[in-house]
Each structure stands twice: as C-alpha cells, then as structure tokens.
C-alpha cells in the first residue's frame, strides 16, 4: 500500500470499455441518474485496487482491500500525519502513562458495539493487543489487562513514549469472539468482517466492492455517506477518465495536468507531499544481497550522480518536495535534523564527486567509461512498476545521470506482483519505490520500521519475508542504529532523543541503504459538487488520499452530501 493509487500511464482508449464493465452504482455526472448524493448513490472511490478484486478484509494480509483499514477496522485513536496535533479518540476516549512510561492506561468510550451487535469492551482491546499479529515477540508487551468494561492497562518491559502511534494509532482492535478462533491469521481472508468502523461489507465482486453504513457504529446518526463503492481499475488513465466523466468521486493519484479532470466543475484537488520516494538498494551482503550496490561507495557515488532537480521537473512536473537524507519531513520535523548539512539532499548532480568516491574505493574507469573493480564493471539493474510512468520516467533519468558518472544502470519495468515479491524477498539490486512517511511529527517510526535491523526485528536474510508491520527491504543491519532506536523507545526527553537521532542520521546518511530522491507528490481528487467535508488546505484535519489507511475511514465520517 505504499504506492497504490499514485500511478499514471500513457493515454489509452480503454476508459469507455472499462466504465461499462465496472458496474458502477448510478451513472452520470454530479449525482445524475436514478439516484443521487442525497439518496442511495454510492460515493465512488478508486484506491488503487488491482484487478480482479479478491475478497480479503484481513487487516494483517498484504492483499487486504483498502476499505478494511479504517472504514471497517480501527485503532484506538486517530493521529493526523499532516500536522503536529493531539490524537482524536475513535474507540478510545483517553489514555495516560505511568511515571516511568512502562504502563499505558486506556479508557474506551462506553456502550460501544461491534458491527454484528455484540458489545465492544476493554476485553476486546486487551485481546487485540495480545493477539499474535499485533504482538510480535520484540514489541515488549508484558500484559494487556481489562480492569473493567471500559479500562485496559497495557504494561511493557520498557518505557513506550516514542511508540505511542504504533500502540494507540495503528494497532487494529479486533472482536475477540471472532478472532479468538483464528490461528492462521496470515491466510484468513475474512470475507465477512466484523469491525468497529462506520461501514460493513455489502457486496464483493471481481469488479467492485461496496460498503454500507454500520447501523451499530457509535456515530451512526451523523454518518452522511451511507454507501461507498470501491471500483476495480488497474491503471491511472482509466481512473482519470472516470474522474473527468463524473463517474468517480474520490481518488489519490498522480495527474500532471489536473485541469483535465477539474474542468467538469465537480472535481477539486489538493497536493500534500508526505512520503519519501527513494531507490531501494538491497544493501547488505552479510544478509544475502548481491551486486555492486552492496558496496557503500557505489551507493554514495550514485547518490552524488543523481540530479534531483531534473527528476522533480521532468518526472514529477514539479509537484514533489525536496527530501532530507535524514528522512525528517520538512518543515514539520526540522527540529530533529541534527546537522544542517544534512537538511536536504543535493539537487544537482556531481559526476566528479561520484568519480572521486569510486576511485578512493579502488575502482578504475574502463575504456567504455564505466567504473570497474577487479575486472567487474559497476552495472546495476533498476526496476519500477509497469504503468507508474512518473517512477518509470525517474528511473530512465537516473540511468542517464548515472552513466554520465561512470555507473551503468539497466532500467526496466515489472508488474506490481513481481515488484512486491522481489522487494519482500530481497532478490533485487535497485528499485524505484516509495516509503511510508512518519505518522507523527517525529522520524522515529521511519527509523525503526525502515532502518532497524535484526535486533529490532525490522529485517531478515534475503529469501525471507520482512516481519509483519516492518519495511526494511534493504536488509540494512547496523548495530549502532539499532541501539539508538532501542534507546529512543524509552525516552520522553527531547534532548536525549535528539542525541540518539543524531547518531542514527550520521549512520544512514553515510550508508545510504535507501538513496533519497524526492518527497512524493500526493494528489487527491474529490467531488466537491456533491459532497462537503473534505480535507482542505485551510482545514487539513486528515491525510486526504482515498488509499490512506485509517485516515480514509476518518475522512468518510466527515463527509456530507450537498443538500
């Protein structure tokens, strides 16, 4: 779900046939047809679904449908990743830490129900935190105990101040009466999910899936959108054509010319860059990575060879933001950048610097202009997902820029499934891909999930899947970084945390297991003619894309049909 919904492809003549095949609820623009936004017309969403759709509403499954994450299943609290603000209670009402940060006492809202009508109590919350998928051996949970129907006490073996979002904002709460019998959660399709969110599943087909209002939702009376239809589209151009034709109400995708879809007078858009776009490198030979990119000097040289300004202009039509090699999101997280020299990655290529780095590491330039060592040229394979032409264009530009610095890169495209499989297995050299940005104004989450090594259970050997909920596809394994991450978990002192982050930043800026490119454009398009309540620049109460986990469910509860 890192990159779904933000693709584009060259113009094709498929939209007309696709619209006919989708089985959309109601036709026409602006709510015309047999039903309208005030009646039973579904809010029509594209969240980057692959085709055909397969029913899977298991929040722990890699193939989970987007509608499960927020609209159906919820955490205790909602954290707005677009701003440094206090979390909002969903299931949860309040929480507090004990004096040393090892105990979190959570009070949930009273009289809650699951979508099947069963009571939702603190017992379900305690069960959820203890459930294997939510509670890997390394998360430090000692116990989760419901002391009454609305109070749960979470006890950890160390202070948990820095993991607040992970515990309270991204742990999905499960109904114990359903999940207590699910032992093989990884292969549970959960086709008829029971959740706490605003919606339940009405129908799932290969072409779409439809959610309808949960009559047992805590705020059911205030829910303006009664039906949501997620449609199966496997490319951006079809989704763009549906937007322009008024047959799609909400999507997050990359459109270089937004006027093409806003001219109908119904669609508006917002751009909220949040997530890093990088070159994944399988960096660690000790964990089984192979290829020239396992040499830090090659990664450093490639970093110097990249012209980010040109990539921003030509591949992303100037909609992206500049990236920090510390992975602090600027300006939101600027206080965490320890060294001003690392505030931003260089925007221009420096082929001479790239050459100097390689030569200092023992490489010599061959007669073909490509550096080599021991007779082996620095030649790398770089893949991106077929149809993501912003990423595909970036890959081509990187190949050209690298060759000018004496590094040979062979860029090619692969299907989404191959991208996902090779990223998980580590059987690749370079990939243009996205990272999940931090959900709070603190880079800890990205440090732990993407740069944490085996000691913090964020990666593993090539050939093994990355642990659930972690994303270190580069197989980076640095004991200094791991020790700083583990220390940061337990501190609530900002000065101490800054020192620890300075240590992490020194290591990752030097080692470059992911080579930073840009903060990716995050365009969201939504129907403001028929619906109000969308996040806007003046009221950015949530991350607005339709594919956003948890946030999308929160946005849906704010929407109202235009009267």
Image: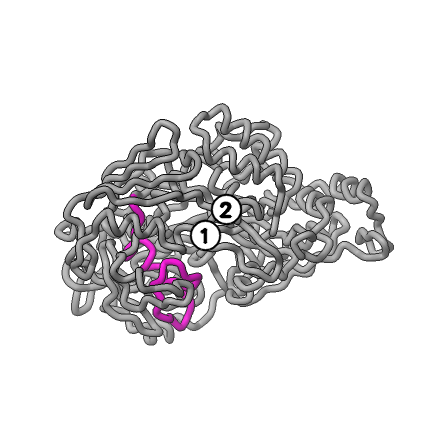
Q: Quadrant of residue 422?
A: bottom right
- Region rendered in magenta: 49-76
Q: Does 168 lie within the magenta span? A: no
* Residue 451 visible in the current orientation: yes
Question: Which callout, 2 or 1, points at the residue further toward the start of the chain?
Answer: 2
281 and 47: which one is in front? 281
In the rendered image, residue 171, in percent from the top left (x then y), is placed at 36, 49
Q: Does 56 lie within the magenta span? A: yes
In the rendered image, residue 135, in percent from the top left (x then y), is placed at 41, 50
- Residue at x-position 82% and y-position 43%: 359
Q: Element at badge 2?
A: helix
In the rendered image, residue 506, in percent from the top left (x then y), is placed at 62, 34
Visual colour scheme: one colour
81 and 14: which one is in front? 81
Whether pointer 2 and pointer 1 mark residues with C-beta atoms closer than 8 Å, the reply is yes
Q: Quadrant of residue 47?
A: bottom left
Q: Element at badge 1?
A: loop
The residue indicated by pointer 1 is 469
How many residues crowd mark 1 within 10 Å: few (<14), some (14–19), many (20+)?
some
Q: Measure the alpha-carbon separation of dots 2 and 1.
A: 8 Å
* Residue 561 visible in the current orientation: no
In the rendered image, residue 391, in percent from the top left (x then y), is placed at 55, 56
237 and 457: which one is in front? 457
Q: Quadrant of residue 491?
A: top left
Q: Magenta residues: mostly which secondary structure?
A: loop
Q: In the rendering, which numbered label is found on residue 449? A: 2
**Quadrant location, the N terminus:** bottom left
- Residue at x-position 51% and y-position 33%: 487
> Is 153 left, or right, of 281 in this rendering?
left
């Amino acid at each position: 779900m890192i990159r779904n919904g933000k693709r584009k492809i060259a113009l094709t003549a498929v939209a007309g046939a696709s619209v006919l095949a989708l089985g959309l609820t109601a036709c026409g623009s602006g709510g015309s047809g047999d039903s309208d936004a005030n009646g039973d017309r579904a809010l029509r969403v594209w969240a980057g679904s692959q085709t055909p759709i397969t029913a899977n509403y298991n929040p722990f499954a890699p193939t989970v449908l987007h509608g499960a994450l927020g609209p159906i299943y919820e955490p205790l609290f909602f954290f707005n990743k677009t701003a440094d603000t206090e979390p909002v209670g969903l299931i949860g009402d309040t929480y507090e830490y004990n004096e040393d940060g090892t105990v979190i006492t959570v009070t949930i809202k009273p009289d809650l129900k699951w979508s099947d009508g069963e009571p939702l109590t603190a017992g379900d919350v305690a069960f959820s935190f203890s459930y294997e998928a939510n509670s890997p051996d390394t998360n430090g949970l000692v116990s989760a105990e419901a002391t009454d129907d609305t109070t749960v006490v979470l006890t950890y073996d160390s202070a948990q101040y820095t993991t607040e979002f992970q515990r309270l904002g991204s742990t999905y709460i499960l109904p114990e009466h359903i999940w207590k019998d699910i032992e093989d959660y990884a292969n549970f399709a959960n086709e008829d999910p029971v959740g706490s969110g605003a919606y339940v599943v009405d129908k799932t087909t290969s072409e779409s899936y439809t959610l309808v209002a949960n009559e047992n939702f805590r705020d059911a009376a205030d829910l303006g959108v009664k039906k949501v239809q997620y449609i199966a589209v496997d490319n951006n151009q079809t989704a763009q054509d549906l937007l322009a034709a008024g047959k799609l109400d909400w999507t997050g995708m990359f459109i270089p010319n937004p006027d093409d879809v806003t001219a109908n007078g119904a669609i508006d858009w917002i751009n909220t860059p949040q997530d890093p776009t990088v070159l994944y490198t399988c960096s660690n030979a000790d964990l089984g990575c192979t290829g020239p990119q396992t040499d830090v000097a090659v990664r450093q040289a490639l970093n110097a060879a990249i012209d980010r300004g040109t990539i921003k202009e030509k591949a992303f039509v100037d909609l992206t933001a500049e990236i920090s090699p510390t992975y602090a999101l600027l300006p939101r997280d600027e206080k965490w950048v320890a060294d001003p020299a690392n505030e931003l990655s260089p925007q221009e290529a420096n082929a001479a610097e790239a050459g100097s780095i390689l030569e200092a590491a023992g490489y010599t330039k061959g007669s073909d202009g490509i550096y080599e060592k021991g007779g082996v040229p620095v030649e790398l394979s770089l893949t991106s997902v077929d149809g993501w032409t912003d990423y595909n264009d970036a890959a081509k530009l990187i190949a050209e820029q690298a060759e000018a610095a004496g590094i040979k890169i062979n860029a090619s495209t692969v299907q989404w499934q191959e991208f996902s499989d090779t990223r998980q297995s580590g059987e690749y050299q370079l990939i243009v891909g996205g990272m999940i940005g931090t959900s709070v104004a603190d880079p800890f989450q990205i440090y732990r999930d993407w740069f944490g090594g085996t000691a913090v259970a964020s990666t593993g050997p090539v050939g093994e899947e990355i642990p659930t909920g972690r994303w270190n596809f580069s197989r980076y394994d640095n004991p200094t970084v791991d020790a700083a991450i583990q220390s940061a978990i337990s501190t609530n002192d900002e000065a101490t945390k800054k020192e620890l982050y300075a240590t992490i930043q020194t290591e990752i800026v030097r080692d470059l297991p992911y080579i930073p490119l840009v903060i990716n454009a995050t365009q969201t398009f939504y129907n403001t003619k028929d619906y109000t309540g969308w996040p806007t620049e003046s009221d950015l109460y949530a991350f607005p894309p339709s594919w956003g986990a948890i946030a999308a469910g929160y946005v849906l509860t704010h929407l109202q049909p235009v009267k």
